[in-house]
Image (spheres, rainbow, N blue to C red):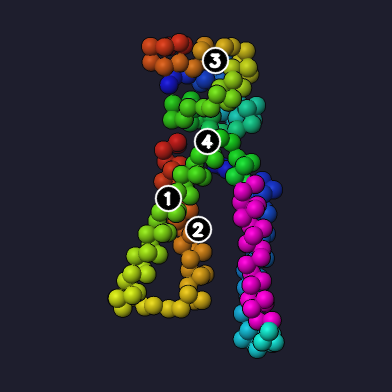
Amino acid sequence: MLCRPNRFTWYLLGWALLSALLALVEALLRRGELVPGGLRGVVALLPVLPMVGYFLALTRWVRSLDEMQRLIQFEALLIQFAVTALSVMGYGVLAETGAVPNPPVGNLWPWLWLLLFLNWSLGQVIVRRRYR
Amino acid sequence: MTNRLRVLRAERAWSQADLAQRLSVSRQTVNAIETGKYDPSLPLAFAIAELFGQPIEAIFGTNGGPHA
């Protein structure tokens, strides 16, 4: 295995699952109109909180890697940053012209996460080939 | 850069995983150093030299430079 799972890997999974669970709960509460108006914003932000833990765990995971693995992650994240930024920018300007659907931002954030993780994986595949 | 890591490892009958464990790095990192695809940092090069009980220049060199 290229990067052996360690305790930080499990922290990452745990925080991501907690966030997904809270997003599901929040969506169900919203659909059932079970949250008083004044608390809707607070409840809506609940899935964001575990992602703070996720990124702290991600930082500690990267620090737990050896020097070459850290370099691979750095270059993979650069590819992720570039591809995601260009994709979002490209889609945004096309949406402004009406060439593609222009959904509200509230409907787009799950797709942004998917794009981020797919592009991170793409980056790793590209960079790891160099050191194989 | 060139290095004698594969030879030194073979002399001790260590696998890449054995060496990786001794150096606290991944097996992929050992493989990348052996194949010349990754040049280790100075601290890692010192750790390798210390592990094999040889000076750095006896393990690592450039084409035409020490160890070659």
Q: What residue type is labelled 3?
A: Ile
Instruction: Answer whether labels 3 and 1 touch (C-beta < 8 Å).
Output: no
User: Can you identify the residue that label 2 sits on?
Assistant: A117
At 61% from the left and 22% from the top, the residue drawn is B47
- Of all chains, the one bearing label 2 is A
Where A113 falls versus B28 (above or below)? below
Instruction: Answer whether labels 1 and 2 touch (C-beta < 8 Å).
Output: no
Outermost residue, front side: A38
User: Do callouts 3 and 2 point to residues on the same chain?
Assistant: no
User: Can you identify the residue that label 1 sits on?
Assistant: A79
Quadrant housing residue A2: top right
Question: For the residue labelled by badge 4, is the local secondary structure a helix, a strand or a loop?
Answer: helix
> Would you call the spot at circle 3 few (<14 residues within 10 Å), some (14-19), or many (20 or more)?
some
Quarter of the N terminus of chain A within the rendering: top right
At 69% from the left and 81% from the top, the residue drawn is A39
Kindly report the secondary structure that dominates the magenta region of the rendered protein. Answer: helix
Q: Return the mark for residue A68.
A: 4
Q: Nearer the viewer, residue A131 or A81?
A: A81
Quadrant housing residue B1: top left
Where B9 falls versus A73 (above or below)? above
Residues under labels 4 and 3: Cα distance? 19 Å
> Residue A132: image x %, image y %?
45, 36
